[in-house]
Image (cartoon, rainbow, N blue to C red):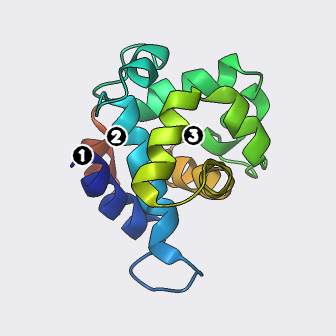
Amino acid sequence: MAGNDLGSLLGGLLGGGSGGQGGSGGGGNILGSLLGALMGGGGAGGAQAAGGARNNPLGGLMDMLTKSGLVDQAQSWVGTGENKPVTGAQIAEALPDETLQKVAAQAGVSPEQAVDEIAQQLPQAVDKLSPQGSLPSGSLEDIIKQQQL
C-alpha cells in the first residue's frame, strides 16, 4: 500500500497529472514501488541494504547508489547544477536483486524495464525533492508535502 501511495505522489511530482510524458504515471509508480520496498514493504533485504531507510527511503537509496560508485551522478541530482544520467545497468548493479524483482512484479514489467524506468525517472525525482541543493530529512511523504509538489 505504501508503494501505491508513494507512486501517486511521485507520479504527480514527475508530471503524471498532466499526461505530458509517455507512460506518465509509470515512472512514479515504479519509483513508489522501489521506495516502498526500501521502507520495508516486504523486501526485508532491500530495507536492510538501505541501512534503516524506513522513514526516509530516499536517503537509503542515495546511500546505496553512492556505495555502488554512482557518487557523481547522485550528487548531481541533489546539487543545483545539471543532472548526470545513469543507466539501467548501473541501477541494476546498485540495488538488491530481490528488491528489483519485487518492484518489477508490482509494476507488471520485466526487471530490465523496471531498471530502465528507474534510471530515467530517478534523477528528475531526486532533483525536485532537493531544491535547496541538499537531501531533506524526514519522511518521504513529509518531504513531498513540504515541497508542495
Q: Position of residue 144 (x, y in %)?
A: 32, 52
Which quadrant holds residue 117? Answer: bottom right
Give, as a three-letter code, the residue at label 1: Ala
Check the image and report above or below for 49 versus 18.
above
The mark that comes first in sequence, 1 or 2, is 1
Say which element carries label 3.
loop
Distance from Cα at disc 1 to Cα at disc 2: 6 Å
Which quadrant holds residue 7? Answer: bottom left
Say which element carries label 1.
helix
Residue on which disc 2 sits: 36
Residue drawn at the location 46% of the way across and 20% of the way down: 50
Camera-near label (3 vs 2) is 2
Marks 3 & 1, CB-CB < 8 Å contact: no
* Quarter that holds the C terminus: bottom left
Give, as a three-letter code, the residue at label 2: Gly
Q: Where is residue 128 in the image (x, y as percent from the top left)?
A: 51, 55
Which numbered marker is on residue 133?
3
Marks 1 & 2, CB-CB < 8 Å contact: yes
Which numbered marker is on residue 95?
none
Say which element carries label 2.
helix
The mark that comes first in sequence, 3 or 1, is 1
Residue drawn at the location 72% of the way across and 21% of the way down: 68
Residue on which disc 1 sits: 2
Q: How crowded is mark 1: few (under 14 residues within 10 Å), some or many (20 or more)?
A: some
Check the image and report above or below for 30 versus 71.
below
Distance from Cα at disc 3 to Cα at disc 1: 27 Å
Asked whether residue 129 is in view, the answer is no
Q: Where is residue 93 in the image (x, y as percent from the top left)?
A: 72, 29
Which quadrant holds residue 56? Answer: top left
